Amino acid sequence: MRREILKLFAEHNTVLSPGAWEYLSQCEDPRNMAEEMICSCDKLPFPISVEWLESFNVVKETKPVTNNSNPSEFSSDELITVLHDITGNSTCTGELNDFVTYFTDRFRRLKTILSKRREASGCMDIVRVKRRAGKAKVIALIGDITEIRGGYKILTLEDESGKIKGFINPDSLAYTKDIIEDEVLIAIGEIGRKKSGYEATFFIDDIVRPSVPKMRNNRIKKGFQGKIAFTGDIHVGSTSFMKDSWDRFNTWINSDDKMAREIKYLVIPGDLIDGIGIYPNQRDDLEIHDIYEQYREVARILKQIPNRITIICIPGNHDMVRNPEPQPSLPEEITSLFPPNVKFYGNPSFLNLCDLKLLMYHGSSITDLSDILPNVTPDSPISAMSEMLERRHLVPVYGKNTPIAPEKEDHLVINEIPDIFVTGHIHRTQVDEYHGVMLINSSTWQEQTDYQKMRDIKPDPAKVVILDSYSRKVSIKSFV
Ligand SMILES: [Fe+2]
């Protein structure tokens, strides 16, 4: 890795000073940090010193001590590290004031990410910007957006110092960028000359989102060289659960097939069961009416998966946890029904899986994004996931169909860039990459229900996405 990073800096006309490599190598993901520096700075210093790294907020990590350097000698569940999970860390008391704290934290986290972008140079607080005329840049949370005659948009921009009215012309670049309420971005434009008795107006020409650096492609990870399988939305308990297809999958994964034998992890991003009372008249669609019986049945079928495979589960909106996100892991009374190779985390969860950073999110906000963004359709979860990465937030807009629990810390901000980002919820099977991040939406084992017909959701069921963690090659196996 050292050689790779030094080459990267050399390509950008700089080197690391003595001591800087030792410092950088102790942060959690040196390669990721190097890429962030290159993308964020117009000109890197020559050489890069330890002091400069400190000023860039490179934080050294205390790594767990291990005497075993050969990853193959670990069992797969020992190689999972939880980087972020709400489970056991909820601070939400349900007070109205909690939302003020929540949105302040959202703003601060996204401001920190945006501040590292080269476009952030020259950004000022809104209170200062309002006192002057001419070119201006602010990092702001977007409040109300209204469209007026002629297609002009008026919006409120807010930071911790104050608010300002923004004005977007339909001919501007900013107009084409589908700004939504509650996102945090850099707004670039001009403050109009202030007339006495009127508030200053910010004419916005362009905006910049936190996004992810474009150069993160083709990252080959070393250490773990097995396969990771992704599937989800099993919906046991529904009359539409595809039992025969699941049996075919079960037979295959227990077979001597080379690919099946190489699978070390099975990742399931939510909706293990169909649940009860999730949508109107769901009773009519249920084969198992008792929620505990539904979990006993899914535990039974997961017990048939070979126990050399670690199964990683988070809850979805059909599971037995609180509805607002982030959702904690399923309770112990449920998890105790499952064999020890099934591991449970919250929704969302950010895990380190054998040196691969995996972001798991069930995906409820995908439908919200498809309602408000023209380029996102309900059958294209990948486009919604790209929009989440652009905005570095899993639920960028508040107040639609995805409820948010006002935690003191916004657990839905994508603080760190994952290698793999997996969602479910939409019951499609899609794989793509966005700026080098592998995006997976992971199928279902439920046929189309009447409710889905009503919402125009067309499932792509009974499929398993299999990723070779080393070569990044993806295969999709169908068990329809
Ligand atoms: Fe589902």
Image: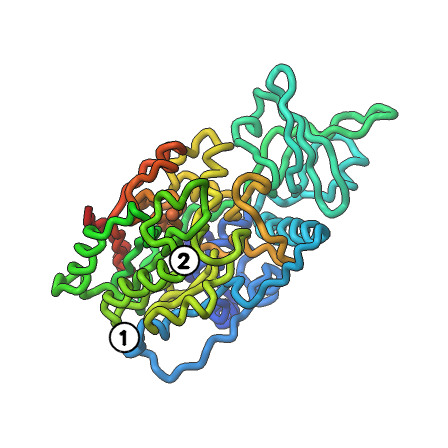
Tell me if residue 30 can be seen: no
Disc number at residue 291? 2
Q: Please tell me which residue is depicted at 61% across the width and 41% down the height of the picture.
A: 182
The disc labelled 1 sits on which kind of residue? Ser
Tell me if residue 240 can be seen: yes
Residue at image mark 1: 72
- Tags 1 and 2 in contact by the CB under 8 Å rule? no
Residue 58, compared with residue 280, is above or below; it is below
Badge 1: few (under 14), some or many (20 or more) residues near its Cα, within 10 Å? few
Badge 2: few (under 14), some or many (20 or more) residues near its Cα, within 10 Å? some
Q: Element under label 1?
A: helix
Image location (x, y in percent) of residue 409: 62, 58
Q: How is the image coloured?
A: rainbow
Image location (x, y in percent) of residue 303: 27, 67
Image location (x, y in percent) of residue 247: 19, 56
Q: Please tell me which residue is depicted at 56% across the width and 26% down the height of the picture.
A: 175
Q: Hey, which residue is sitting farthest top in the picture?
A: 150
